[in-house]
Image (cartoon, grey):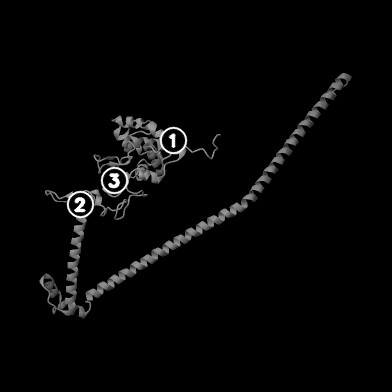
């Protein structure tokens, strides 16, 4: 007995590396021929291995299915260890490839993967090396079949694709910017300025063998700032005490000397009130602030006037257009009546001309008939 439609099993492709790579590209947004091209590029770059790595490339190397280079890291342009783990996730790597390739337009393929998506030959910076195009063409047939299966049966689920690379960080829309990496557990410790140093890249001082990472340098700088701030606060408290109580409170070292120099006379000067120069400067500042506020109010008033004028113009224009729209049917009827009157006049003139022509023809025929009758009767012509 033949199986019914409900008993038939829906065919599903095998979870081959090419199919999983095509599924990741599909989730990233690639469609149609772009899906085939990017799947073939993934085969050429990593042999469809999500944890493929080329540490010899610049900017810390290239990683993942599409060998995304560390220069594409939005935080410093270097392949940190957290960025590598993030790229080992096929979904993240596919999203980065979608941005680098400029979506389904594939305008960025030639400049980044050195292959022409239209011809399959080497192009761009790698035009002198035919191997780029040859290896791409070797993976094209398998990529085309994988893309066909994705478009016919649907892509593999995101959970299945993530299990494909167990050492990768979890998928996220963008590279993590918090204090921990996308995979958790690894502190980024901020980002180096201008890409000169990186959290995982040690900085070696010139002419020495001392090497410190950016995180360590940042921690040392923070400690020095805290020490300097504490000293400044202590000096401030000493000067405040000297101003308040004179020099009765002995303080050791340079802080005590500064407090003694500031105490006494400064306290008395503060008690005496502001000097005339201070009063004059304060009055001048208040006058300047008042003038600034007045200029600001004048500017706002002019802007309001210009806005009101523009609003009135717009309203008048809208009213004019509305009136023209209301008058349009009447003008159309008037024009139609005028054209009909002209047509009737032309028709009457044509009838008059035709009638005149007929009258002349009848008169001419009557005259000829009379001449003929006269000739036949021998009488004089009319």
Image position of 381 with respect to 75: above or below: above
Residue at screen point 19% across, 55% down: 217
Distance from the alpha carbon under mark 1 to that under mark 2 = 48 Å
Foreground mark, 3 or 2, reads 3
**Residue identifier under label 1:** 148
**Along the viewing direction, whichever of 236 and 264 lies nearer the viewer:** 236
- Quadrant location of residue 12? top left
Residue at screen point 35% across, 68% down: 293
- The numbered mark, 3 or 1, whose residue comes first in the sequence reads 3
- Quadrant location of residue 108? top left
**Can you tell which mark lies on residue 84?**
3
**Residue identifier under label 2:** 213
Q: Residue furthest left?
A: 253
Foreground mark, 1 or 2, reads 1
Q: Where is residue 310 shown, x and y percent of the image?
A: 47, 58
Left or right for 336, reference 255: right
**Along the viewing direction, whichever of 361 and 319 lies nearer the viewer:** 319
- The numbered mark, 1 or 2, whose residue comes first in the sequence reads 1
> Which quarter of the figure is the C terminus placed in?
top right
Q: Where is residue 306 shown, x and y percent of the image?
A: 44, 60
Mark 2: which secondary structure?
A: loop
**Along the viewing direction, whichever of 247 and 210 lies nearer the viewer:** 210
Q: Where is residue 46 shown, x and y percent of the image?
A: 31, 37
> Which quarter of the figure is the N terminus placed in?
top right
Mark 3: which secondary structure?
A: helix
């Amino acid at each position: 007995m033949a199986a019914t439609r409900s008993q038939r099993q829906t065919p599903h492709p095998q979870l081959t590396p090419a199919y999983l790579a095509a599924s990741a590209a599909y989730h990233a947004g690639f469609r149609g021929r772009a899906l085939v091209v990017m799947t073939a590029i993934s085969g050429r770059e990593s042999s469809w291995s999500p944890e493929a790595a080329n540490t010899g490339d610049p900017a810390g190397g290239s990683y993942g299915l599409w060998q995304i280079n560390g220069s594409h890291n939005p935080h410093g342009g270097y392949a940190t260890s957290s960025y590598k783990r993030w790229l080992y996730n096929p979904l993240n790597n596919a999203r980065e490839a979608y941005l680098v390739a400029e979506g389904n337009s594939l305008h960025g393929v030639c400049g980044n993967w050195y292959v022409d998506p239209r011809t399959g030959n080497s192009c761009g910076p790698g035009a002198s090396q035919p191997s780029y195009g040859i290896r791409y063409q070797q993976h094209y047939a398998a990529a085309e079949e994988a893309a066909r299966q994705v478009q016919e049966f649907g892509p593999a689920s995101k959970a299945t694709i993530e299990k494909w690379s167990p050492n990768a960080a979890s998928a996220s829309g963008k590279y993590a910017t918090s204090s921990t990496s996308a995979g958790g557990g690894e502190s980024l410790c901020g980002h180096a300025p201008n890409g000169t140093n990186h959290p995982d890249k040690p900085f070696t001082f010139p002419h020495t063998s001392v090497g410190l990472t950016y995180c360590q340098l940042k921690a040392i700088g923070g400690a020095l700032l805290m020490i300097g701030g504490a000293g400044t606060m202590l000096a401030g408290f000493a000067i405040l005490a000297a101003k308040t109580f004179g020099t009765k409170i002995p303080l050791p070292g340079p802080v005590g000397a500064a407090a003694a120099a500031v105490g006494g006379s400064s306290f008395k000067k503060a008690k005496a009130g502001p000097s005339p120069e201070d009063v004059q400067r304060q009055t001048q500042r208040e006058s300047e602030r008042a003038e600034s506020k007045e200029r600001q109010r004048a500017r706002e008033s002019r802007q309001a006037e210009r806005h009101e004028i523009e609003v009135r113009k717009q309203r008048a224009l809208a009213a004019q257009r509305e009136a023209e729209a209301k008058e349009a049917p009447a003008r159309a009827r008037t024009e139609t009546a005028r054209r009909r009157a002209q047509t009737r006049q032309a028709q009457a003139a044509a009838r008059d001309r035709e009638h005149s022509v007929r009258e002349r023809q009848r008169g001419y025929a009557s005259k000829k008939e009379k001449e003929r009758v006269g000739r036949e009767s021998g009488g004089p012509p009319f």
